[in-house]
């Protein structure tokens, strides 16, 4: 999906796994491959080939117009034609760009000449995003996959990964996907989508392609998953005890509720409104009044109070050490 209104923020290093509503669409053209061969094909370039045709990667006419932006670097006029890498810059990043050099810009004999790699320059993220957003996103994705998450695409590693989804090593390496059952194919899809150790998993209508036993296993796995999960579904039964936050879409309007919202029907705990205090009770059921927090006294103040107590005792007064 491509947003039509508003701004969408994507973290530079996020890895997202997406499983389509029709899960078998991921493997329909690879039924004569083994699960191991399919995973090797899908990730052999370091990127996920299944995501290369997404709408947010297609360069539109508007994108091309924005990419015509002219940058003034070292007294020359240049246009960016490629982004190759990034590095930390203050609290953000800057990107290594290659250019074409402008001559007679705005005149009849305007020319753009490719520059050498030695002429590459670094442009801050905030600037390059204005003209080359999709190129920046592409570099961010490559960097995210390379940030300490490299996994060798070898048989042993793939077999160990698939074993987490209940797939036998013999089946993963030697069985063609054409001969697998529906449940086994779904497990292959789940294993492949999670190969890059995603921070966020997006499941589109999982109840459409999983049987009850598989849904139970998926629910258990999602509860132990330490990343984020988004489930698009019409089945409240499946998400009832699984999600802490609900975004209900009805008649073109989205109503959030649950974990991070003041009111609603999500399974997560309801947050207290500002000024609203939680009532506390002791073991006998009596309400505990919330008194003011005691102020910690300095050492000199404690010594002074101790002297006062000793003086009062000398006068014959009954004083307790915890009186204050």
Image (cartoon, helix red, strand yellow):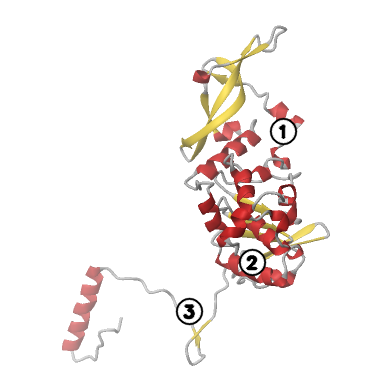
Distance (Cα) linking label 1 and label 2: 36 Å
Q: Kindly indicate the quadrant of the structure image that contains residue 274.
A: bottom right
> Within 10 angstroms of label 2, few (less than 14), some, or many (20 or more) residues?
some
Q: Is residue 208 above or below residue 174?
A: below
Q: Tell which of 135 and 157 is nearer to you.
A: 157
Where does label 2 land, which residue? 218
Q: Which mark is residue 290?
A: 3
Between disc 1 and disc 3, whose residue precedes?
1
Specify whether 240 is left or right of 88. right
Between disc 3 and disc 2, whose residue precedes?
2
Horizontal and vertical percent for residue 37? Answer: 62, 48
Distance (Cα) linking label 3 and label 2: 43 Å
Q: Is residue 76 above or below residue 286?
A: above
Between marks 3 and 2 in the image, the one whose residue lies nearer the viewer = 2
**Residue drawn at 55 percent across, 76 percent down:** 278
Q: Which mark is residue 59?
A: 1
Between disc 1 and disc 2, whose residue precedes?
1
Q: Kindly indicate the quadrant of the structure image that contains residue 109.
A: top right
**Residue drawn at 71 percent across, 31 percent down:** 63
**In terms of secondary structure, where does tag 2 sit?**
helix
Horizontal and vertical percent for residue 313? Answer: 19, 88
Q: Residue 167 carries which label?
A: none
Q: In which quarter of the image is the C terminus?
A: bottom left
**Residue drawn at 19 percent across, 78 percent down:** 307
Horizontal and vertical percent for residue 245? Answer: 65, 65
Asked if one can make out residue 318 in the rendered structure from this viewpoint, the answer is yes
């Amino acid at each position: 999906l491509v947003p039509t209104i508003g701004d969408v923020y994507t973290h530079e290093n996020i890895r997202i796994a997406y499983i389509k509503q029709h899960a078998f669409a991921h493997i329909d053209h690879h039924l004569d491959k083994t699960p191991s061969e399919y995973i090797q094909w899908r990730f052999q370039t370091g990127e996920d080939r299944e995501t290369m045709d997404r709408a947010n990667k297609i360069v539109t006419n508007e994108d091309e117009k924005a990419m015509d932006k002219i940058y003034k670097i070292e007294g020359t006029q240049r246009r960016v034609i490629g982004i190759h890498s990034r590095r930390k810059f203050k609290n953000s990043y800057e990107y290594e760009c290659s250019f074409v050099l402008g001559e007679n810009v705005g005149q009849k004999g305007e020319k753009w000449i490719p520059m050498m790699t030695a002429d590459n320059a670094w442009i801050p993220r905030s600037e390059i995003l204005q003209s080359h957003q999709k190129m920046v996103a592409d570099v961010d994705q490559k960097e995210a996959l390379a940030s300490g998450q490299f996994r060798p695409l070898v048989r042993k590693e793939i077999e160990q990964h698939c074993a987490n989804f209940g797939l036998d090593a013999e089946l993963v390496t030697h069985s063609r996907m054409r001969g697998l059952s529906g449940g086994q194919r779904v497990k292959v899809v789940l294993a492949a989508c999670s190969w890059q150790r995603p921070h966020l998993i997006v499941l589109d209508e999982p109840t459409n392609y999983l049987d009850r036993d598989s849904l139970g296993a998926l629910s258990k796995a999602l509860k132990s998953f330490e990343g984020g999960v988004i489930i698009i579904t019409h089945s409240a039964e499946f998400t009832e005890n699984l999600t802490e936050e609900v975004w209900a879409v009805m008649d073109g309007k989205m109503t959030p509720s649950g974990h991070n919202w003041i009111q609603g029907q999500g399974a997560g705990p309801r947050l207290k409104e500002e000024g609203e205090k939680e009532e506390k009770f002791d073991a006998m059921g009596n309400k505990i009044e919330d008194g003011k927090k005691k102020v910690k006294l300095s050492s000199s103040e404690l010594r002074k109070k101790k002297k006062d107590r000793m003086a009062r005792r000398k006068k014959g007064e009954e004083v307790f050490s915890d009186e204050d």
